Amino acid sequence: MGEKQTRIIAIANEKGGVGKTVTVINLAAALSRLGKTVLVVDMDPQANATRGLGFNPDEAGVLSIYDLIIDSRKVNVSDVLQSTSWAGLDLIPAHVDLSGAEVELVDRVGRENSLKSALVSLNGHYDFILVDTPPSLSLLTVNVLAYARETIIPCQLHPYAYRALSELFDTVDAVKTEINPDLTITGILATFVDLRTRVSNLILEKLRENERTRNLLFKTMIRTNTTIADSAAVGKPVVFYRSSAFGAIDYSDLAREVAGM
Ligand SMILES: Nc1ncnc2c1ncn2[C@@H]1O[C@H](COP(=O)(O)OP(=O)(O)O)[C@@H](O)[C@H]1O
Ligand SMILES: [Mg+2]
């Protein structure tokens, strides 16, 4: 058992395409560059965080978070932990099988706490554990929110994404009341920011006026930056792919803000 005070953070938003996975990959990488030890847990059956960190989720013989959750009597955490090419940055990969976990968990006692039980032995071993979530309110997402202590909510500066926030607040409140009283919202992260556009400014203004969001908005905002998408496509976090890109600078700023450095 390690002695670190591990911060377990879910990156959540029921909407897809808002920058969750990119935030998981790049916040994790930027934190590791600050000297923090970081584990990424990929809980999305699409396995994009797994690919974004340079792993092929379909490689034969590689066990995923699915195997650990479903087969926890036979599979140990050490069987699913992968070191990445970057120091201090580890991964527990996802696999498309994870989409079936939902059905397999449903009859289990304590089904909402399957992830928490599976990962409990890692408490104290990392400075940060960042968990990616699927773009739906599923039992998988509930498992992530039951396990995490904190939530970071990426919000694309677009009217649909803004409107979807209230659903996410309801979900977090429900999980907090029913399952995990320790869960807090650490911050809302504005993504796809382009201050030259009217829509970015309009939604930012709404986030700054809204009672529920105004004290939660991170100072750091993530600008729209095509290098972020390019780096994900080649399986590298942008901070390692091109450290001078806006995306790398923004996620490094976010890492310092999250770590309080
Ligand atoms: N700041 C950004 N600038 C440009 N493209 C981005 C940015 N953030 C994410 N993307 C791209 O947008 C798409 C959706 O992002 P992703 O992180 O996968 O969203 P989610 O996980 O919420 O579905 C991906 O193709 C990703 O590479
Ligand atoms: Mg995603």
Image: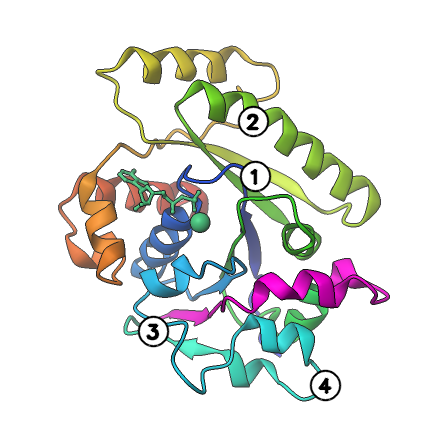
**Disc nearer the start of the sequence (2/1):** 1
Q: In this view, does 219 lie above or below 197?
A: below
Type of amino acid at the residue the image marks with label 2: Ala
Q: Residue 73 carries which label?
A: 4
Image marks 2 and 1: residues in contact by CB distance under 8 Å? yes
Which sits in the foreground, 228 or 5?
Answer: 228
CA gap, disc 4 and disc 1: 31 Å
Q: Residue 84 carries which label?
A: 3
Type of amino acid at the residue the image marks with label 3: Thr
Considering the numbered disc 1 on the image, is that residue within a helix, a strand or a loop? Answer: loop
- Ligand 1: which quarter? top left
CA gap, disc 2 and disc 4: 38 Å
- State the residue position of label 2: 164
- State the residue position of label 1: 14
Q: Is residue 101 covered in magenta? A: yes
Q: In this view, does 16 lie above or below 115?
A: above
Tell me the residue at 24%/56% (across/down): 233
Considering the numbered disc 4 on the image, is that residue within a helix, a strand or a loop? Answer: loop
Marks 1, 3: nearer the viewer: 1
Quadrant of res 53: bottom left
CA gap, disc 3 and disc 2: 34 Å
CA gap, disc 3 and disc 4: 26 Å
